[in-house]
């Protein structure tokens, strides 16, 4: 691959997670989540989040998001999210499919964050109780966002407060939850239910797991429908121990936090190096492990000539490129890319 | 676990498959199926099935079945299957969800096999073109069946011929495909498209994989919608190499056939031993790796006292128990169970 | 039309209902049910059913049934009904569509009535709480049934009691509600909520309306979702006064009961006359306005030669014909048909 | 009602249409569209549109729109429409329900018209064939628009051309089709298929029918699925003659054009009168039978004191009011309202 920083999905599996799979292989285990690993995972996550939670291990983020939304929105619901949210842009209508046709109502805001004022305004005029319009049903936030930014705790609390005022539950798409958490340097509880989040897509795949995510429901009394929704969607694994064991290993010895800190540090290093080059512009503050950066075409061409390609983002004429670092990004690779970029930028300026 | 022969889902992962996961972990790989393992898998399965096929790797059988049916039935379709079919009994309405509300039309038959005469009769009177009734859309067969029996090639061809007469595609739920294949001792092509099957849920999880199945479409030109359906259902894995590598290892050196032969042999051994005991009745011929066996309550109690429990099936008063053997069932365990059963039966007769 | 007794849907509109449409045409009225006629209809139906009810006027029976079921079953629900139920046979999967994929679980029974023992047995083994199976969600009864029979009050109560034991609400498809009511000679309350019915499709179209049905919810507190479900399905009429006024006229001066009594009497007259002919067999007791009658082919041919055709039912070889009488069936026509049938039967016997 | 110009839905039924209902009541008619009126309607509309068309009579606009879209978009489709489109704002998610979860992709533009440049830009970057995104499936236009404006023929052709370039069919929501047609003074063919429209929701209810719309498919070969989709949605009327006869009467003697011309003229009269008052602002050119007009609060209060109320639109602070004229709006009422408005405006200015 000559594509650099293409995606955190292109990275392999963190070795302790692979070892955990082998360790979980001894003997028989009850199927469909009746195994010991799943039980331990619920205990572990309850401990981590400082309250009893219901846990649904899954293999993909789209499944976690879509099932979460189906658990909190009726088919005639309106789900408020940012236009750039993964659930809107990158899941091929998964939330619409799972909810039976709910509508994603898009709320703009800088840095791929929902603007609180706009959300409040839209909800105030949503015509609640008028069956001509979809019924306001939920707010969905992405943390870290699709622009590589991170909601502050205050921002989260403010949005959740608006949601609560209108009686709406809050979903968090935490596909890059760990990257946001180490960025804010707070507890998992602070970034979720203490801020007003009701249901969380807890991601691990992008941060070192093979294929493991979990829906976490902060009020377990509300989790009953998810057992059925998950099963009929084909997301209840027969050998669920292998999902649970991935997540247990992910949380063991702070592997998840170490992985995320590394990825974020690599993104910061890349951002710092690129940000100072002439003609190069970072679209947003780099607060997690993603950069969206406008590169002059001459730089793009210069880099390509040296064997470095990047992932173009949005309309081709914009010059924007997405770079994503991962748990195992090599600092030497970052430095090699930066050196080449500096050279290309110098040439292109001359 | 004191439950014996509870399910082939309770067994662990076949060692070569676990090793393949580790081997696939080196370096980066394109995500969402753009990786080399996925490409090799398509080549390998095309070779195995003796024609070019389209392949969609997945993690669960319910996903494979539901997506397959959604690819061949409109929302207003009727899908003909046996009442005991997994798609009808054990998937919580997955096919109805994925198809947007198609109807499973149930066709009885012995040994959990669709009776050809009944299928022909129902289709003849289905009122095609009359929009008051669902539109006949597909026939779905399970091979091996949910009763542990196996359709003969002639039976498959006859049902497929009826389907073709009415213009309906045929789906095969091959959750235990390998067990059926070694039972018939034929080629994969003979048991599928040469017999008239259009789309196959090719199972591996029950036969030694960690979590790996594949939809196989025998006419790749008809596979386009599955890319979208799979993605929006959350069944497109970002790190798909780990699904593909499982299936490659599964097929390597005939692992899949060796595993299935062993499981079938263990079921036959169990059937032979139990079948001769007084008061014990096998519900159906044992042709794969499952037994459904009526046990006198005194035998059940006697076995329980010795620490052997089995999985009750159907109404509690029936006395039926399901026993499923796996790729790693220990012959010594079979013999130990048989010895205990003989003892219990002798006591209960006296 | 040379088709005799083809359907009660082939009859026109009862004159007082047509007059009511004209009477409702004066002046403006609030749209979407904010009109006076709709308010009066709710009052009138509350009076008629002897309790406060929520009312949703609609134009078709399929809409009434499908929306009713969507209001009481989750997408992963199981709805228990007779195989011959209209919701299963004649609505092209409407209930599956509206519920988001619920499953109709079929319970046999004589005369198109659910057998209480079978229902109890199936529910006892439905595996409640096990997400592999659909969750038992509702029981749906048809009154009068699709076979032209009528559940007695005791039969209704017994089935509703079984449903209540399992926590399931009861839906009644009352497409021919009036025909059943006059057959039982009881009050609307007795045949519905007093017997344990929770939600009713109250039909009028087949009994003289132009296009008017109503969903009646006996606990109005549970009706909220229907406002949204109805609207998004396109069944909220902008000029709803014209639905409400049809139903008001239908109930005025016992028009509905008079119409139904006439239709039932005509069916009884036809049944009596045909039932005595050699070789003719009534499939079920004639308790409403439908007959299902086996006619010898010689009789069918003889009648056809005289210009009388009937609607064949089921497999063509069975010789069964459906005859439906209506609010305006002419007794002279019945007698003319009977005379011709007698002649044909005599010839065919000779 | 003290609400003035509240909606064209508040008006009654045009007398010839009511008379046609009575005329269609004689004798029996085949049910479910097998009647003569339905056949004549298809002939009549084929004549009117100057080509053979397939016709599906219905009772509501939401049904016509949602079914049309379900006929042309897969569940994973993207449907391009204006944010103010009725399908987006006022149908409670009907299109999402009917399509099985397609996504409405919103394209801004002045006067509630899709901006051609934006549509072209969005389609160019829609990532066709990439299953992460919904598949571009259809363009839906509203004619007349929700802002009371009308697309010119050139505008229609330009948008349809963009759609065709990307292989997308074009749907027209013609809830106020007649109002647009008389505004453009062109033929029905010119405003639809000759401009590139593939499927039309042909509205009549707002323009004088009781409850009658029709889906018109310009290529009848593509209409087959609609028979099933309509039936399972409960929109196939058993006594369809009463839908067909409304539409026949609507088209007879140019009733529809006369009604629409009157409504448009009344809107123009109102617009002219209000537009000249100080502080009053028409949001858009008035090209059909709707006005959206900003009224100073003092004028609103003055009018209310005189007994004239209007329908507020959008956020309450905006001061916008919607006024809709109908086929039977009395010119004297318009003049009375204008006189009162002038008085209120004079007082408020002083």
Image: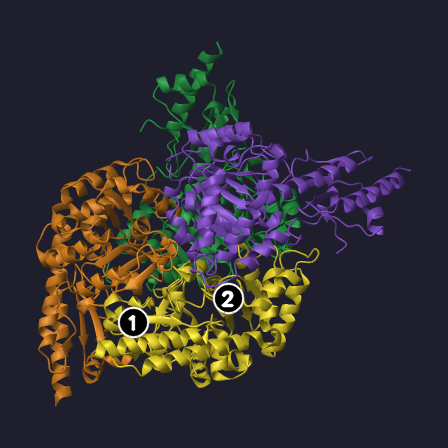
Chain colours: A purple, B yellow, C orange, D green
Judged from this view, the residue extending furthest toward the right is: A350
| Mark 1 crowdedness (10 Å alpha carbons): few <14, some 14-19, many ≥20 | many
Which residue lies at the image location 69% right of the left edge and 48% below the top edge? A328
Query: In the structure shown, which secondary structural element does the residue marked by tag 1 occupy?
Result: strand
Quadrant location of the N terminus of chain C in the rendered image: bottom left
The residue pinned by badge 2 equals B205
Mark 1 vs mark 2, CA separation in Å: 25 Å
Give the residue displayed 58% in from the left and 62% down from the top: B243
| Residue D85 position within the rendered picture, expressed as x and y whole percent measured from the top left | 50, 41
How many residues crowd around disc 2 within 10 Å: few (fewer than 14), some, or many (20 or more)?
Answer: many
Quarter of the picture containing the C terminus of chain C is bottom left
For the point 29% across and 67% down, which residue is it?
A: B305
The chain holding disc 2 is B
The residue sitting at the top extreme is: D350
Q: Position of residue D93 (x, y in %)?
A: 44, 45
Q: Is residue B246 above or below residue A59?
A: below
Task: Pick whichever, C58 or A286, lies toward us.
Answer: A286
**Is the residue A76 above or below the residue C29 in the image?**
below
Tell me if I can see residue D177 in this picture: no
Q: For numbered disc 2, what is the local secondary structure? A: helix
Quarter where residue D152 is shown:
top right
Q: Which mark is residue B320?
A: 1
Q: Earlier in the sequence, mark 1 or mark 2?
A: 2
Can residue A120 be seen here?
Answer: yes
Q: Quick one: A149 or C178, which is closer to the camera?
A: A149
Give the image location of residue D273, x and y in percent: 48, 24
- Please, which chain is the residue tagged with disc 1 on? B
Q: Looking at the image, which is closer to me, B147 or A96?
A: B147
């Amino acid at each position: 691959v000559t594509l650099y920083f293409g995606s955190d999905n292109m990275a392999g599996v963190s070795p302790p997670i692979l070892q955990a799979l082998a360790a979980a292989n001894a003997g028989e285990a009850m199927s469909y989540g009746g195994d010991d690993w799943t039980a331990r995972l619920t205990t572990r996550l309850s401990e981590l989040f400082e309250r009893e939670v219901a846990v649904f291990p899954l293999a993909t983020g789209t499944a976690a998001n879509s099932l979460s939304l189906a658990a909190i929105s009726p088919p005639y619901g309106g789900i408020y999210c940012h236009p750039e949210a993964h659930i809107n842009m990158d899941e091929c209508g998964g939330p619409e499919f799972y909810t039976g046709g709910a509508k994603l109502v898009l709320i703009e805001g800088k840095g791929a964050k929902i603007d609180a004022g706009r959300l409040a305004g839209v909800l105030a005029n949503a015509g609640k109780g008028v069956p001509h319009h979809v019924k306001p049903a939920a707010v969905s936030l992405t943390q870290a966002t699709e622009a590589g930014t991170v909601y502050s705790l205050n921002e989260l609390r403010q949005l959740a407060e608006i949601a609560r005022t209108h009686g709406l539950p809050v979903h968090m798409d935490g596909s890059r939850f760990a990257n946001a958490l180490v960025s804010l340097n707070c507890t998992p509880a602070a970034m979720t239910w203490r801020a007003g989040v009701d249901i969380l897509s807890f991601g691990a795949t992008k941060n070192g797991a093979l294929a493991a995510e979990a829906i976490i429901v902060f009020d377990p009394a509300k989790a009953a429908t998810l057992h059925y929704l998950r099963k009929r969607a084909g997301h209840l694994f027969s050998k669920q121990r292998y999902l649970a064991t991935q997540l247990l290993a992910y949380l063991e010895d702070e592997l998840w936090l170490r992985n995320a800190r590394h990825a974020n540090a690599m993104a910061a290093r890349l951002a710092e190096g690129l940000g100072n080059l002439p003609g190069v512009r970072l679209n947003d503050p780099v607060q997690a492990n993603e950069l969206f950066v406008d590169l002059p075409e001459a730089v793009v061409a210069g880099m390509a000539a040296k064997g470095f390609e990047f992932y173009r983002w949005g309309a081709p004429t914009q010059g924007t490129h997405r770079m994503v670092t991962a748990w195992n990004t090599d600092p030497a690779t970052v430095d090699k890319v930066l050196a080449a970029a500096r050279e290309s930028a110098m040439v292109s300026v001359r």
